[in-house]
Amino acid sequence: MDAERDTGVGTADQGCSRIGETRWQPRLWQGEISLRKGDCVEADVLIIGGGVGGCAAALAAARLGKKVIMTEENLWIGGQLTAQAVPPDENPWIEKGGGTQLYLTFREKVREYYRRHYPLTFATHQDRYLNPGGGWVSRLCHEPRVALAVLYEMLAPHLASGRIILLLPYKPVKAETDGDYVKSVTLAHVHTGETLTIAAPYLLDATELGDLLELATVEHVIGAESQQETGEPHALPGDPDPLNQQAITYCFAVDYLPGEDHTISKPVEYDFWRDYKADFWPDKSLSWTIANPITLEGYVLPLFADGSGRKDLFSYRQILDKDLFEEGAFQSSVTIVNWPQIDYWLGPIVGVPEAEAWHHLYMAKQLSLSFLYWMQTEAPRHDGGYGYPELRLRVDVVGTQDGLAMYPYVRESRRIKAEFTVLEQHIATAVRGDLGAEEFFDSVGIGGYRIDLHPSTSGVNYIDVGSWPFQIPLGALIPIRVENLLPACKNIGTTHITNGCYRVHSVEWNIGEAAGYLAAYCLERKIPPRAVRANRDHLEQFQKLLVKFGVPLAWHEIRPL
């Protein structure tokens, strides 16, 4: 190979986006710009996917002076935080440094946004650890639109300077490769179908499903590995099952207005879902009975507090607590419904024909709407009787006409075959004992969460395994063959099992941020990513760079999760 090919750095022409015959008008945050045939957009790093990892990667690369193009198929950037409407799932140490400095800055900016713009009570305004939603799933539950505003605030100087160009809504449809290099990606406008092709020296796959891995024929894995392959105690016995994937969920927001009737129209598939019961589930899906993820036994959790001391579902992922604001500011508190009852496991959306995937997406939406309709019409009430018509679907909170999140909550995507794969044996408390998690010499960040797998599309119930706070190894970000594509989302070298704890918000942010710094580091030194891991001096320099920018490489305070 020639010297330029060895470095993984493309030519100037490869850094351009050639525009087709029709006028191209990408939607940008700053407004609309127009590019005609023959115009060229140059970039150092092309990030496909503007979710949590994509945004972190863009900020990291731009921090190091690189020009970035980031695309996203939804109208909202932010992924889990916004378009999927999932309040953060985080580790217990997050307030004391259990994430990157950039991620902690995002969290503090969310709090400051509420302090600047919302009529908080004096006591709430002074609360150092303000939790605007009061939800108990996280120490910081907030509205998706606030996360969206904060992400744009963080991106603002780079968008204004043109260092980051954001294209919405574009979805990757084709990738052109040359041996071990991905030359370009063709994207289609989600609504008009117009296409454009962009090339850059480095490409980051930050899509929710690992779309580029398939389009660019990057070696990857889907679904569940077998025990024979990985040796993991909780891996599948027998053969691997690519179609055994975690459930997806269409989240939605509701508030509660006593004395009012906000019952939605009966969903088309309501009768099916009303009668549906999985063999492994303790009751019908449309019920208050949910499964304890540790014992797998069923128990009833009330919608509202019933005086028993049990935590209630409404406050679980509550994103706005009206009692924290001045009297009369809000009619009701608002919660996100992302509960076990609306996990969809009847079939996967990865590794199946497109028509089948669309069917499962449709049925997942119908499940969510059916659960809302059941709550409004048939659910046993805390005060006697049946149905809570007072529950109002808040379409404005998620920015869609049907009131469901713009995109399903995706817990598992395609995963690269990497130089190093994180196994259950590296982090599970039952395997590691008192040793803590495996220490990785090539750490590029940290994370902490239980190995939490929701019911799967092959009928496997919860897998909930204790784990130690862990590191993110650089080897898990490096494909076994391809030189200039990096994962920047949930698509790193984990297994079906370990994906269960590497998939949450703060870890995905760290993965994306590390990938953005890595691409910039490699561009400046004209070396491929795998050379950073293979060379002690480069690895040390890169890790020092990460520490300089506030990426912790090891845990200082740990206990089992």
Image (spheres, rainbow, N blue to C red):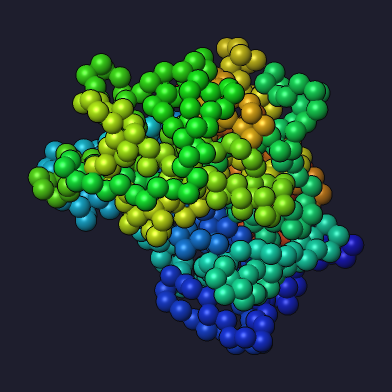
Q: Nearer the viewer, residue 396 or 61?
A: 396
Residue 259 lies, with reference to residue 460, above or below; the image says: below
Q: Is residue 504 above or below residue 524?
A: above
Q: Is residue 495 visible?
A: no
Say which of 216 and 431 sits in front.
Answer: 216
Q: Residue visible at 61% across and 64% down?
A: 171
- Quarter placement of the N terminus: bottom right
Residue farthest left in this picture: 327
Q: Is residue 472 above or below residue 115?
A: above
- Along the horizontal axis of the image, is 8 left or right of 154? right
Q: Position of residue 525 (x, y in %)?
A: 70, 58
Quarter assignment of residue 65: bottom right
For residue 504, side relative to residue 121 (left or right): right
One can see residue 62 in this view: yes
List the single residue furthest toward the front.
Answer: 271
Residue at 77% over, 27% down: 226
Q: Position of residue 81 (x, y in %)?
A: 44, 48
Left or right of residue 216: residue 506: left
What's the residue at 52%, 39% (across, down)? 272
Q: Position of residue 39 (x, y in %)?
A: 63, 85
Report x, y in % for residue 146.
33, 53
Picture mark count:
0
Q: Is residue 266 left or right of residue 455?
A: left
Residue with the most extreme right position? 1
Q: Is residue 285 above or below residue 405?
A: above
What residue is shown at x 65% (from left), y 42% (from top)?
348
Name the quadrant containing residue 457: top right
